[in-house]
Image (cartoon, rainbow, N blue to C red):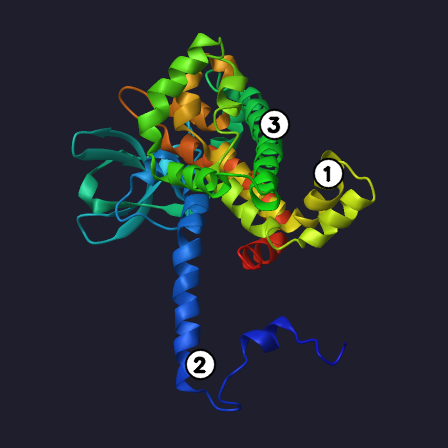
Amino acid sequence: MTADRITVSSFLLKRSGGARIDTSDVMTYLYLTVGTFLMFGPVLWLVFSSFKTQAGLVKYPPPLLPYQQVQVEVEGHDKPLPLFMVTLDDGTVRELAQVRRVGIEAQMVDPANPSADVIKVNIRQREPVEEVRLAWENYLDPLVELENFDFFTYLKNSIVVTTVATVITLIINSMAAFALSKYQFKGRDAIFVLFISTLMIPITVILVPVFLVITSIGWKNNLWGVIIPGAATPTGIFLLRQYMLTIPDELLDAARIDGASEWHIYWRIILPLARPALAVLAIFSVMWRWNDFLWPLIVLSQNDYFTLQVGLNAFQGELQIQWHYVLAMTVVTLLPITLVFAFLQRFITTGIATTGMK
């Protein structure tokens, strides 16, 4: 076993042509590099941008790293002044702090000698002095200071909706898949085709009817109105049914001979054997429910019931959008999904690879 193990570096540097680099090696590493950049590039850009100030987000060309202008304390001024590299009329370059700006004219002082005369320059003669600095306030302000964004209430609602909806989805879909895969009855295949055909119905078509039903039973501004409508999913039924078809019918017949009830067979035999497929469906369900925005936005109108995705809408005003807060809270909302995927990702390959095998 030890002899078969290879290190990460040796695995990444393996070549199909032996000692020399083959053309296929070049194409493979080029393909993997481009693919990695396309997959993780937007995520890295999101993370870096979440640490930028609101002014830093509108810079052009947009920098990758979160640069902020350096500010210095100057004697005689209550607040720190922004620092610039100024090219004077005689061609010399000096590091000056800006006191104020009037139109295209900037009034500058020397931070080392603030009592000297004010130097007036054109704004085109200066370049801001910047350094990489993380704007942690983008994360701290929504959690502590902002009154219109109750992060912990939204987080609690999102956890409740995601957890309860995922459990209900797994139970309902597994029961339906068990019936459609292990019972022989008239019209079974027609019912299965009917379930799958609902995938072709756009969500916008059923929004109004489902909302009217939710309102009529009193689930508007209620988390149950967000949880229940999407409990049964055709994708989940298809995935679990195809996996359960791979479970031998002889196991169920043997359990029936031993006196096991149908509920006992479902709970003690089917569910344990279908764990890889259930884990895949659990990942999908968590992603669907955690990232869902449209349906909770329609059902929920009271701030106390908002989920995180709906709560992010609070940063969108009539005149401007607070993108620095939106990006920071988006990164926060991505963390639970990342953790769930990290813990359950080993089931994905097994669950999907064996789906459809008979």
Secondary element under disc 1, as helix, strand or loop, is: helix
Classify residue 256 as left or right of residue 52.
Answer: right
**Front one among 261 and 306:** 261
Secondary element under disc 3, as helix, strand or loop, is: helix
Specify few, some or many for label 2: CA neighbours under 10 Å numbering under 14, 14-19, or 20 or more.
some
Q: Quadrant of residue 282?
A: top right
**Front one among 162 and 67:** 162
User: Residue visible at 64% across and 51% down?
Assistant: 276
Q: Which mark is residue 25?
A: 2
Q: Residue 164 at x, y = what percent?
A: 61, 27
Looking at the picture, does residue 268 appear above or below residue 92? above
Q: Which one is closest to the eye, mark 2 or mark 1?
A: 1
**Front one among 143 and 132:** 143
Whichever of callouts 3 and 2 sits on the residue coming sooner in the sequence is 2
Secondary element under disc 2, as helix, strand or loop, is: helix
Classify residue 124 as left or right of residue 259.
Answer: left
Whichever of callouts 2 and 1 sits on the residue coming sooner in the sequence is 2
User: Residue visible at 39% across and 72% down?
Assistant: 30
Q: Which mark is residue 164?
A: 3
Between the residue at mark 1 and the residue at mark 3, the CA separation in whole angstroms equals 19 Å
- Quadrant for the N terminus in the image: bottom right
According to the picture, the residue beneath numbered tag 1 turns out to be 267
Q: Residue 258 at x, y = what percent?
A: 83, 44
Looking at the picture, does residue 294 appear above or below residue 19? above
Residue type marked 2: Asp
Residue type marked 3: Val
